[in-house]
Amino acid sequence: MSAPPPSSIPPSPAPAPDPTSSSAPRAAARLPPRVRIVRWLRHFWPAPLGIDGRERLRFIVGAVLGIFLTAVLSRWWAGGGHAHGPWMLGALGASAVLVFGMPSSPLAQPWPVLGGSTLSAMVGAVCAALVPDPALAGALAVGLAIALMVPLRCLHPPGGSMALYVVLTAGDGLHLAAFPVLFNVLVLLLAGVVYNSLTGRSYPHPQQSPARTAVAKGAFAASDVDAALAHYNQVLDVSRADLEGLLQLAGRAAFQRTLGEVRCADIMSRPAMAVEQGISLKDAWTLMRSEKIKALPVVDAGRQVLGIVTVADFMRLANLDLHEGLGQRLRALVKGRSGQPASVGEIMSHPVQVARVGQHAMDLVPLFSQGGHHHIPIVDEGGYLVGIITQTDLVRTLAVAVQGQDTAA
């Protein structure tokens, strides 16, 4: 009854060698020195950003508006006699790149931008006051700023330049931390919140994924992502929530690539054994036993599917309350007793779930796993029965795909 394993499933392409595996360094060591040097030099050439022209324009316009608004307000504030030094810092341009270009980055969120910049400026002021040598003071300021930003969860790369700027500026460091640093950052953040929201970007961007109450077998859990990040042990310029979302999308894409092109026609059993609703239960039971099948679609004279009769239907009507053997009860049912059903049409399940011959086989997974179905008749565009797919057919297809992946690995 079940179709043979489909031969049309394309084998998964062999994965690229894992650069972290122990065999990768040995393979690289066997390459000629010239090839190794060329490969090493290629590491300096970055990959494309992967954004389209619309996103690039959104990024540019946001940075222009944010810096312009900050400059205008800061200059106005300084012109009002509230400042005696610089009214804007060059490091704000780097902050604008993060806020408007990478609004989902952990380094671009409001607290890192505000806390990292202001805190670093204050650290620079303290180092400048306590250490006479500007070179040593600047180095200490950057290091201490990083040491504070990491545990306080406000790591912001321009913060390092803020700390160094305050050290190298001969002036009141604490005053610089208040203006222009704090003032500049507050205006830029306000512009970032408004502009990103108006252009469809979530800002502030959530950094934690909502807790999943149930995890499908074989799917990764939140703890798995945490374990992977702990093993990675590097600063990651993507939020944990986005990383988990990307992993889920990658898993779906891999699953779709493996099985997404398999159609019902590729795995269904054909021709499908079927009976008309007027056939006797005895004849239907005899056919199921001789063909060693557990379900029979019930069709009309034109092969339109009306219902389905299964072994479970016979069992359900075998009067299980009687204290006689199951075989004896089934024989009594198929031979007929007064008051008992006599034809297939009287015990069949209807309406019946069907699938189209050109439908993706993966569409049937929820029907089998959650819908309680064990046999699904397959019909053509006209609704005529052309085959049937069982759980065994689908499991065999999954096994072939997984075996192909394991072989390629």
Image: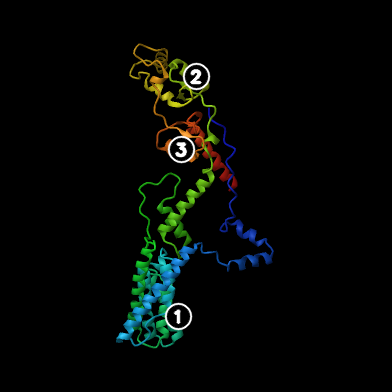
In this figure, which residue is indicated by the disc labeled 1? 139
Question: What's the distance in space between the residues labelled 3 and 2, CA to CA?
Answer: 26 Å
Q: Amino acid at mark 2?
A: Leu
Residue 175 rendering spot, x and y as whole percentages: 33, 83
Q: Secondary structure at mark 2?
A: helix
Lower position in the chain sequence, tag 3 or tag 2: 2
In the picture, residue 163 is in which quadrant? Answer: bottom left
* Residue at horizontal 39 percent and vertical 88 percent from the top: 170
In the figure, 345 relative to 376: above or below? Answer: above
Q: Nearer the viewer, mark 1 or mark 2?
A: 2
In the picture, residue 43 is in which quadrant? Answer: bottom right
Q: Is residue 263 left or right of residue 97?
A: right
Q: Amino acid at mark 1?
A: Ala
Neighbour tally class for label 1: few under 14, some 14-19, many 20 plus, Cα within 10 Å = some
Lower position in the chain sequence, tag 1 or tag 2: 1
Total number of numbered discs in the rendering: 3
Question: What's the distance in space between the residues labelled 1 and 2, CA to CA?
Answer: 87 Å
Residue 23 at least partly seen: yes
Residue 290 rendering spot, x and y as whole percentages: 52, 19
Neighbour tally class for label 2: few under 14, some 14-19, many 20 plus, Cα within 10 Å = some
In this figure, which residue is indicated by the disc labeled 3? 364
In this figure, which residue is indicated by the disc labeled 2? 287
